Amino acid sequence: MNYELDHMEVREAITKLCANFSNEYWQDCDRNRKYPTEFVSELSRQGYLATLIPEEYGGLGLSISVGAAILEEIHRSGGNASACHAQMYTMGTLLRHGSVEQKRKFLPKISTGELRLQAFGVTEPNSGTDTLALTTSARLENGHYIVNGQKIWTSRAEHSDLLMLLARTTPKEEVKYKTEGLSVFIVDMRTVLNKSLNIKNIPTMMNHSTTELFFDNMPVPVENLIGLEGKGFKYILSGMNAERILIASECIGDAKWFIEKSARYACDREVFGRAIGMNQGIQFPIAKAYAQMRAAELTLKQAINLYEREQNPGEEANLAKLLCAEASWAAAETCIQTFGGFGFAEEYDVERKYREARLYQVAPISTNLILSYLSEHVLGMPRSY
C-alpha cells in the first residue's frame, strides 16, 4: 500500500494515539450515541486540535497540510474526527477576521482544551444550503445583539462551549447586495444555555452529535461580533476552502481504511478451499477503488499546495471534496461487498464506517452543489439557481 510521506512524524504519532482507542471504543460510542469525550480530550491534551492556532496564542502554528494529515490518519485508523474537526475549519474565520482582543480572549483557552469551539451555526430549516436566505436575526440593543431564530444540523453544540454563529443584522429587503447584512458572532453558550438558547438532539443514521438550536432573545455582547457588521457571509466563505480540504482528507483516510480492510480480508477469507482474493471478481473492485483513491489524493494535494501558497484554490478544493468523497464511498461499497454478510456485523466496523462515509456525499456541501459551482465558475455555463 502507498502511504503519503508528508508529515510522517505527525502521522505516526496520530496512529499511536488512535491505537489507544480500540474498535470496541468506537463501537460503544456508535451503539450508545456517545460523544467520544476521552478521544477528543486526548487530542486536545497533546495539542493536535490547536494545530492551526498561532504559537503566540498557545497553538502549534502549523499549516493546513498538517491538519489534513491529522484528520486523515484518524480516519485511516478506524476512528472518526467529526467529533472535533470543526475546531480546525472554523478557526480560519476567527484567525483572519477576529480582533486582537478576541484572539487573546479565546484562542489560548481553545489551545489548551479549556474551551471547545466545535459548533458552527449556519444552516436553517427553511434555507438549507441557500445561506443568503437565512432569517435568524440579531438586532443591536444596549451593547448586546439580541438573537432570535433557529438553526439546524449544528453538530456538537451539546459538547461545545463556543458557537460560531451567522445571523442577519440587516433585513434582506434593506440591503443593496444580497451577500450583505449577515454577521458572524462568537457565542459563549455556557452563559445562555437553557435560558435564551435551547438545544435539541437530532437522532441520525450515524453518531454525529447533530442538533437543532433555538434562540429566544439570546444576548450576545457587542464585542463578540467578528469583523464588521454585515460582512459575515464573506468571512464564512473565506473558510470554506479550508473546510473542503480538511473534509476531503478525512475521506481519503476512510478510503484507505476500507481498501486495507478489504485487501486483508480477501487474503484471509477462504471459500471453496481458496482465498477469495484469488478471484478477480474480488481483486479488481479493490484495485479500482485504490486507483480512484490515489487520483483523488493527488487532487487534494494540489488544493493543499495552493492554499498554503495563499492562492485561491476554489476549484481545486471543491474538486478535492467531490473526488475524495466519491473515492471513499466507492471504497466503502467495495468493502461491504467483499465482506458479504459479515460486512453488516457490528464487530467488523465496516457497517459503522459505511454509514459514516455516506454522509460526505451530502455534507458539508452536497455533490450537486459542487457540480453547480464547477459548471458556473469554472466552465462558464449559466447559473442554474
Image (cartoon, helix red, strand yellow):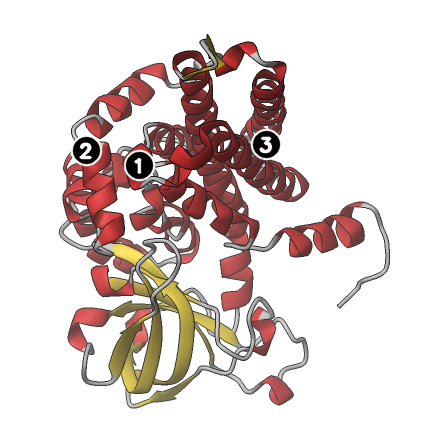
Badge 2 density bin: few <14, some 14–19, many ≥20, Cα 10 Å: some
For residue 374, above or below residue 195: above
Which dot, 1 or 3, sits closer to the camera?
A: 1
Label 1 – label 3 distance at C-alpha: 28 Å
The reply to whether residue 283 is in sight is yes
Badge 1 density bin: few <14, some 14–19, many ≥20, Cα 10 Å: many
Discs 2, 3 touching: Cβ within 8 Å: no
Q: In this view, does 254 lie to the left or right of 9?
A: right
The residue labelled by disc 3 is 306
For residue 222, above or below residue 8: below
The residue labelled by disc 2 is 21
Identify the residue at image location x=20%, y=37%: 24
Image location of residue 158, percent across then percent down: 23, 65
Q: Which residue type does callout 2 highlight?
A: Phe
Badge 3 density bin: few <14, some 14–19, many ≥20, Cα 10 Å: some
Image location of residue 309, percent across then percent down: 55, 30
The residue labelled by disc 1 is 79
Name the residue at the right extreme: 381
Label 1 – label 2 distance at C-alpha: 8 Å
Image location of residue 1, percent across then percent down: 47, 12
Give whichever of 121, 106 is nearer the camera: 121
Q: Is mark 3 on a helix, strand or loop?
A: helix
Q: Which of marks 1 and 2 is nearer the N terminus?
A: 2
Q: Residue 118 sits in which quadrant?
A: bottom left
Q: Which residue type does callout 1 highlight?
A: Gly
The reply to whether residue 161 is in sight is no
Give whichever of 74, 115 is nearer the camera: 74
Give whichever of 96, 83 is nearer the camera: 83
Image location of residue 133, percent across then percent down: 59, 77
For residue 276, above or below residue 47: above
